[in-house]
Image (cartoon, helix red, strand yellow):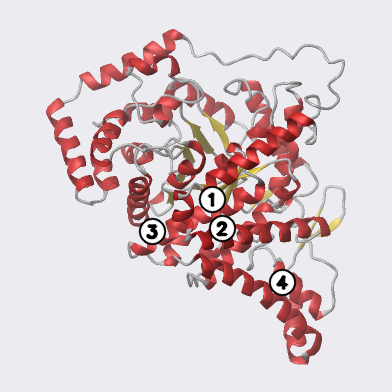
Amino acid sequence: MSILAIVQANEQYNKSIELSVQRAKTEKKYQEQLQKQWDRNLKNIKSHQLPTGLEIPLIAVPQIDHPAQIARYQGEWGFPGQFPYGLSIYEKSFLITDGERDHEEPTRIFAGLGTPELTNERFHYITQCQQSKRLSTAFDTITLLGRGADNPDYFFDIGEGGVSITTYQDVQKLYEGFLDTNVSISMTINGPSLWMTAARLQAAREAGQNILKVRGTSQTDPCKEDDAQNELLFPLDKSIRLAMDMFEWCARNAPLYYPINVSGYHIEQKGATPIQQAAFTLANGFVYVEEALQRGMSIDSIGKRLPFFFTSGMDFEYISLLSAVRRFWAVAIRDVFGAVDPSTQKLKAHVQTSGRSLFEREILNNITRTALELFYALLNYPQALHSNSYDEPITTPTEGAVRIATDAQAILLEELGGFKDMMGFLSDSSGRMKAYHLVLEGILDYFRQINEMGGILQAKAEGFFRDEIARSSALYDHQVQTGQRRIIAVNHYNEGRGSPREVTRVEISTEMKQKRVDDVKRFKSKRDLQKVKGNILKLQEIAGNGGNVFEITMQIVKDVTLDEWTNALQQVFGLYRRKI
């Protein structure tokens, strides 16, 4: 992969905009061409009436009449659904006309606590007020590490911070009532992602669903794990191979399912600045593009199947972060990798409000912070959106806090006079465009540095991503400690405040943990052990011979538990060793 080519393509695109602007000032034919295109776009904009009686257009566009201004607007920003997708990848995101919305609302609330049964109850609770059922699953640390709930070393961690999953039956219980193809299920899991995805797809199949129509996402981003979260089960190169095994299989057999979700959220949570998050996440995305190309997949097939995951925080850059990322990606995918299909050029993204911006002190202030971060996120028109609960700094979110987080999105999308009424009502305002260009240039600068180091994987090997994130994290902490970065009621306006508010915590009882252990042991005891051993040997043989590991995982997942799958592959591939 040529990082230099990606840099040059984006630099060239910037120059092409300036060239277009200059042509529009002097060339009569070009002026007429631009004006016709502009008039055609304006003519296609419909209007509708607000409840107050006011008639407004469905899309906001600037009042410009000179061809040079038109050239700059279309090159820099574009109409909804038009290259370079600065405003949106879709024409009618969030709009409600005649009481209906063209697209599913983006709400996707994160949930996972204790047992599969408890989490299933929470899923039913949070989807009561959603027009579309879109789940997002949090797993406990034991599950993320590929260990079983019956492992005595991890007893006290069972169900803490997420749901405990070890067996195929656990997955069936977890998603009971949500396996229809009209439900989109997201799973935040990386190391054991192949096992979890196979179990989810097989559960859908057993429930009578056609997996060709199953929708959802698995995170499966080993590059991000190497940068920030350290929950890889196997060495990075082997983890990338496994991710691509699943990516390739799903392209053929589950075309509506996204088996990889390139994640910047955890990079930001580790301490990265908004621009670092954008640059490093894009770089990781290009790693998967290159890996898929080497497997013989076409760029138009790859681009449609690689969604991203970003933070929306309190910093100014977030007002345009996703818009800038979309443009950078679109230019690279089209001009470097040769994607012809516009749907391939469109970067799809899930956004989550920043957990790092939430504080225990005066904890209800987190509601305000999250609401503002949601507003920033919606200005960028993401395809999925999670709002953090105000109590997340100290506990697995409680029911009341989750309901506030869910309602916040509904209020912004269905009550606020904005997103439901007019696309891009603050689109290319001066401040947003300034942030847009600063983020773009910041991304380009990081890609130039990565190129000088010899490419993305070489930069990772030298610890460049980690070092940059660590420096930014230390600076952030210093700014909070010194008051340079103001946190209301934490380091500013904190005089005379009483004791911290008592907040209810979600407790996973010892009895509940023991029930999980008993369930797993019962499942394991009822199996044909010879069949299980044979399946594990078959898995190891295919892994060692370079075969598709996901394909065999689909075949054995009903019998082989998550921990057995992990241990078998670690014997073949070895363990991930974090670089210090």
Residue ID at (68%, 50%):
94
Secondary structure state at the residue bearing disc 2? loop
Residues at circles 3 and 1 in contact by the CB criterion of under 8 Å: no
Residue ID at (57%, 59%):
449
Q: Quadrant of residue 177?
A: top left
Camera-side residue: 252 or 358? 358
Give the mark nearest the N terminus, 2 or 1. Answer: 1
What is the distance, in whole Å, between disc 2 and disc 3 at their CAs? 18 Å
Query: Which residue type carries mark 4?
Result: Gln
Query: Which residue type carries mark 1?
Result: Phe
Q: Which residue is mark 1?
A: 308
Camera-side residue: 366 or 130? 366
The image shows residue 444 at horizontal and vertical percentages of 62, 62
Q: Which residue is mark 3?
A: 291
**Residue 90 visible within the image:** no
Residues at circles 2 and 1 in contact by the CB criterion of under 8 Å: yes
What is the distance, in whole Å, between disc 2 and disc 1 at their CAs? 7 Å
Q: Quadrant of residue 387?
A: top right
**Quadrant of the rendering where the N terminus is positioned:** bottom left
Q: Residues within 10 Å of mark 3 (few under 14, many from 20)?
A: some
Q: Which residue is mark 4?
A: 74
Q: Which residue is mark 2?
A: 347
Query: Which residue type carries mark 3?
Result: Glu
Camera-side residue: 400 or 127? 400
